[in-house]
Amino acid sequence: MGISHHRSLLFWFLLLVVLAAGPAGTAEQGFVPVTGPCNFSFPDDHGPHPAYRTEWWYYTGNLTDEENHRFGFQLTFFRSGLRSPDQRRDWPQPASAWRSDQIYLAHAAVSDIHAGRHLQAERMARPVLSLAGAEQTDAAVTITVYDWQAVIRLDSHRLAARADDFGLALDLTAAKPPVAHGEEGYSRKGQSPERASCYYSFTRLQAQGELTVEGTRRRVKGSAWMDHEFSTAPLQPGIVGWDWFSLQLSDRTEVMLFLLRQPDGTVNPASSGTFVLPSGDARHLQAGDLQATPLAYWTSPHSGARYPIQWRLQIPSLELDLALTAGLEDQEMRTPHSTGVVYWEGSVRARGTRGQKAIEGLGYVELTGYAEPFDAPM
């Protein structure tokens, strides 16, 4: 599509969001809040949850090709509710085939670490006339935005996306069962009970398949991570963004943590994390358990945002002390034709110790609110 067409789509998307929000303070009217344990049931909860305003299925991972060149990838599908199911009942009948109370968006990126390049693309469509949506059967959930797709089964996932200068087709197999974060999936994002999401992850997925980068096709294998999160609440006022870390370590453990940043640089007490043992059992980590100290920064020539790109991550209760380094400085995502959000989402390498033992690993980091305060719903 041409730039002018994308801008037209963005205009209509923003207009629909404004109309859906209604008067100030009623943006969540009719949607269900998250206020307690989510009690996931699979495979049903791999599918969409239209009673909640915002939802995403987030895949990241680190891959190597046959020449041992390293790549990172991201493929994310977002669902945003424009009208709650209750509000939809007021529509005139029969409804137009183009009428929808949802919109689907998707971001994809490949970080070619060896060549020092970061390629990205985005999609947006309403779930009408087979343009986008989530289809759920007894065997699988299929999420589609145009020709991008994720197929989720009980213990496997299939990803496919193609853009002008890159593409991916990956098969992912779960090495561990899904992990519910927080209290049975109830992940607090603020001080009041409804400032929360339902959140689980596949923390270790074995990946194999194919990457195409600027016309060159490569067989790849490696490891991936999947997040699925849904919520109705916007970020608590006073939170400007978050730093999210997912790490897969050489001792078969994984770490997820998110730090909710306040304007003065301090971390909101609702920040938390999860430590996953080789068995798949999980341990909840509170804000006081987590110390992430930036050691170096990079300033984007595209947005002017200044991002940390090296960290010292310490979790004293686990005797974990890691140095994290971005595989590429420029892994900034700019999405003017879909969400309109500028954020950094990139592959990182970890080296350090756990107790007296050396440890290393790979992972992904997401940084929001550095270009401007992030006020989108969780």
Image (spheres, rainbow, N blue to C red):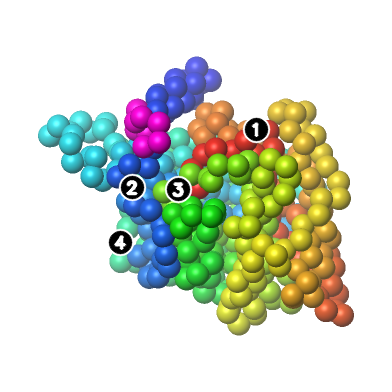
Q: Nearer the viewer, mark 3 or mark 4?
A: 3
Compare marks 1 and 2 and give the one earlier in the sequence: 2
In the displayed structure image, the side of residue 131 where residue 262 appears, left or right: right
Real-space Cα distance between discs 1 and 2? 27 Å
Which residue in the structure is indicated by mark 1? 372
Quarter-wise, where is residue 354 in the image? bottom right
Q: Is residue 163 visible?
A: no
Amino acid tagged 4: Thr
Q: Which residues are magenta?
A: 19-26
Real-space Cα distance between discs 2 and 3? 9 Å
Which residue in the structure is indicated by mark 3? 233
Which residue in the structure is indicated by mark 2? 31
> Residue 170 location, x and y as percent?
56, 57
User: Which element is circle 4 on?
Assistant: loop
User: Which element is circle 2 on?
Assistant: loop
Real-space Cα distance between discs 1 and 4? 40 Å
List the single residue furthest toward the front.
192
